[in-house]
Image (cartoon, rainbow, N blue to C red):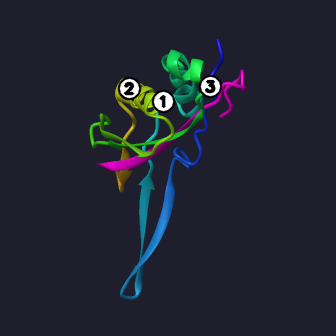
Amino acid sequence: MKAIHLFCLGILLASAQFLFAAEGTETTNVAITKPSFPGGDQALVKFLDNQIKYPEEAQKQRWEGKTLVAFSVNEDGTVSNVRVMKSSWLVLDNEAMRVVKQMPKWIPASENGVNKKEMVVLPITFDLKRRNIAY
């Protein structure tokens, strides 16, 4: 069976960033972390590889494309508000959304140790020619 080529570009970058914001004459350090999939990028790719099934209709029609799926990672790590930001083919979009809705809890974003809700955009490329998954 043909594999799905996935790109997890720029969604889970550095585990922490430090911003320096000036308030009057003093500088304040703000520790910010982005949401991350439990186990990191490789675990995310493995999850997607195990869960995504290239739709039979899309294989027969030779449909390929990249679907950008956006979703929120809530303060408790749950995934919500799953939607397609950029469509490829409806059947591919539906498969991408189905799998994102099944994701386990993420490690939420935080600012100065306080969890916060943040949007994530996950590009999923369906490619019949590729046999391996690239991360």
Q: Earlier in the sequence, mark 2 or mark 1?
A: 1
Q: Tag 3's secondary structure?
A: loop
* Viewer-closest of 126 and 76: 126
- Distance between the Cα atoms at labels 2 and 3? 21 Å
Give, as a single range, the part of the protein colored magenta. 114-135
Of circles 2 and 3, which is in front? 3
- Residue 83, percent across and down? 35, 41
- Identify the disc placed on residue 92: 1
User: Is 123 in the magenta?
Assistant: yes
Q: In the image, what residue occupies the spot 37% across and 49% down?
A: 119
Q: Using the image, tell me which numbered label, if any, was put on residue 25.
A: none
Give the SS element for disc 2: helix
Question: Residue under circle 2?
Answer: 98
Q: Amino acid at mark 3?
A: Arg
Residue 90 position, x and y percent, is 43, 33
Which residue: 72% across, 21% down? 131
Q: Give the left or right position of residue 12, taking residue 72 as reference.
A: right
In the displayed structure, 71 sits above or below 62; it is below
Could you tell which of marks 2 and 3 lies nearer the N-terminus? 3
Give the camera-side residue of 113 and 47: 47
Residue in view at x 39 percent, y 37 percent: 107
Residue 31, percent from left and from top: 43, 58
Whether residue 135 is visible here, answered yes or no, is: yes
- The quarter of the rendered structure image containing the C terminus is top right
What residue would you read off at disc 3?
62
Task: Say whether residue 27 is magenta.
Answer: no
* Residue count near mark 2 (Cα–Cα under 10 Å), binned few <14, some 14–19, many ≥20: some
